[in-house]
Image: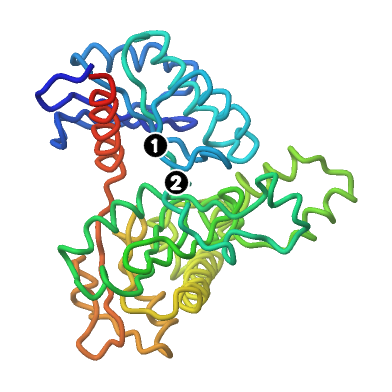
Amino acid sequence: MVPDRDPFTLVLNAGSSTLKHAGYHGMHCMSQGTIECGEADYPSAIGRLLRDASWNAIAFRVVHGGNELNAPAIVTDSVIETLDRTIHLAPLHQPPALSAIRTVGSLLPGTPRIACFDTAFHATLPEVEQRFAIPDQYFHAGIRRYGFHGLSYESIASQLPEISERAAQGKTIVCHLGNGASLCGLDRCISRYTTMGLTPIDGLIMGTRCGRIDVGVAIHWMREGMNAQQIEKILTKESGLAALSKGTSDMRTLVERADTDPRCALAIDMFCRSIAKEVTAAATAIGGLDCLVFTAGIGENSAIVRRKVVAELKWLGGAIDNQANHLGETRLNTSSSSFEILRIATDEQQVIAGHAIRLLKRSEAANR
């Protein structure tokens, strides 16, 4: 039961080597941080966080909701069973999230747990974007485009009305650029196109993920004797910027070395080219381009990436204000640009906290 006062919510984002956390009182963030730890250390790390306050709910970022979970949900045994069946769809992300959920369940068995899914925001994709050109039975079995980074896109969509009416009411393409990277085409703040597919491998070149690739490459490797685990390791952990640069996926390092290391320069150019190509695809899918938004670690902090991407889109009328871009301002386009260019910080934790509060209140109202 949630008290009449604003609830205290702990948000957990569990990764393979880090545990990000944020504590909220209502929608006010009281604390946040990152704990360097693996799944084996979750009981002690989460135990310390649970002692920090009397939490009314614990909310989790879960990357994949599969074919069944397309909205935030209170965690039950059934939800956990469903998520167990999605592990193969996001093998880097689902296990730590499930481990954190189970850990909290054992430490605070009476406290509501809320799962929020990155795939849920893209439930509005039209069928023409959901489907692959494969036999029907596979589509109905859940082999389709889900899309990811939905909590980030939801954060941007919630901020657009206060920043730009044109962007909020029109055709906006959001570039979530970090170690994982994707694009989302919004029509009136609703997802209508995204670059990631069944898994988070597809779409843009990323830190260690290959992005869009001919599936024949995997078939070729299988014929050479590789198994699924070996191929998955190459495509998810040994590719992307790290492979192109022969060493690093950190955009800051790539930029520092670009003038003297041709491989780093190539990695940046290929990354930016992949973004520009997907922007044009997204603009085709949503029927225009009123605004381009950069967000997440690279999108918010790399002026060079933003400049290079917009330069690739010069033929579409894009023009960036170099001084505003260098200073990291919110509005980056010149007055002559055919579309707005914005830099907006994303806040996935706040989105998760909001979902948790709404679910708790609905649950309380239903139990009265």
In-image side of 8 versus 228 (left or right):
left
The quarter of the displayed image where residue 172 is located: bottom left
In-image side of 86 versus 339 (left or right):
right
Q: Read off the residue under disc 2.
A: 120
The kind of secondary structure element at disc 2 is: helix
In the image, what residue type sits under mark 1? Pro
In-image side of 90 versus 319 (left or right):
right
Query: What residue do we see at 55% from left, 28% from top?
Result: 95
Instruction: Give coordinates of residue 134: x percent, y percent.
Output: 76, 59
The quarter of the displayed image where residue 107 is located: top left
Instruction: Give coordinates of residue 148: x percent, y percent.
Output: 48, 50
Query: What residue do we see at 42% from left, 17% from top?
Result: 42
Q: Read off the residue under disc 1.
A: 72
Position above or below: 16 against 147: above
In the image, what residue type sits under mark 2? Ala
Residue in the foreground of this view, choosing between 364 and 9: 364
The quarter of the displayed image where residue 6 is located: top left
Residue 367, disc:
none
Position above or below: 72 against 239: above
The kind of secondary structure element at disc 1 is: loop
Instruction: Give coordinates of residue 268: x percent, y percent.
Output: 48, 67
